[in-house]
Amino acid sequence: MKQETAVQVNMSMWDAITSASPVVQLTLLILIGLSVCCWAIIYSKFRQFKAQQQADEPFVDQFWRASSLDEIFDTVDRYPESPAARVFKAGYLELRKIADSKLAKKSDDDSAPLLSGIDNLERSLRKAIDLEVSMLESRLSLLATTGSTGPFIGLFGTVWGIMGSFHKIAQTNMASLAVVAPGISEALIATAIGLAAAIPATVSFNHFISQTKQRELDLNNFANDFLNIVKRNFFKDA
């Protein structure tokens, strides 16, 4: 009875990991490291998306309530976490450059200048949006890499553990459970940890990519609204 108890203790998960071959232990260490990095990215990205959404709502509300673009620009620094505010700032600064350049011409009634060069403003807004999207997509590649390679890294550890079991059978000429169990145990642990690292990474990657596309759509809509206002009020033949 005491011998059976000792065998059960030796077959625990921790004992299987500590008694695994160096190759399998290195595989498990890589998977655990990837998993820790992925969870850190998931946490930081969740906070990033939440902070940007909370910052965008009051700025967009301020944008539609303001009576002039200058009034919006004077308050834009109050929303440092808002992507829409940064897109507006980039567009406003480009609009001022156009107004100060040779592309500006005074209207007949000597009121606001009539501008040309709307393509420059559109490119500036597009560049600002691309920069925001790039910031949202940063570090997501590690989630995609872990999701796609995690199961295969775990499978490598599985194959190596099973190979070790066959090697022990060849050495002992015995195919008993006591001979093959350690190798099979470490093999299954490698598979489990590989899936445990890959599944959350894949689900989170798909979620954040979907959120990024939605944010890009919102920024494009905001940029289009900004362009429409500018065209109606400042650009000739608009």
Image (tube, grey):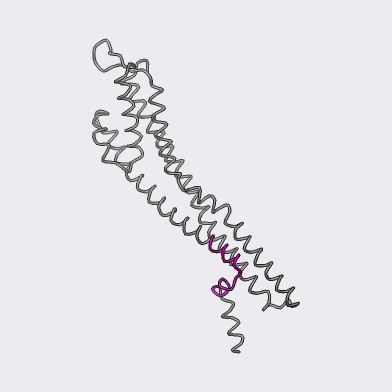
19 in the magenta segment = yes
Q: Nearer the viewer, residue 33 or 94?
A: 33
**Which residue is painted at 32% across and 33% down in the image?**
89
Q: Nearer the viewer, residue 121 or 167?
A: 167
**Which residue is painted at 54% across and 73% down in the image?**
14
Q: Which residues are magenta?
A: 13-30
153 in the magenta segment = no
Image: 24 above or below 55: below
Q: Which quarter shows the N terminus?
A: bottom right
Q: Position of residue 231 (x, y in %)?
A: 35, 22
Q: Quadrant of residue 85?
A: top left
The secondary structure that dominates the magenta segment is helix
- Furthest toward the top, the residue is 108
Left or right of 37 on screen, residue 106: left
**Which residue is painted at 39% across and 29% down in the image?**
124
Left or right of 194 on screen, residue 96: left
Image: 174 above or below 57: below
**Which residue is painted at 73% across and 75% down in the image?**
171
Q: Position of residue 109 (x, y in %)?
A: 24, 11
Q: Quadrant of residue 64?
A: top left
Q: Nearer the viewer, residue 30 or 38?
A: 30
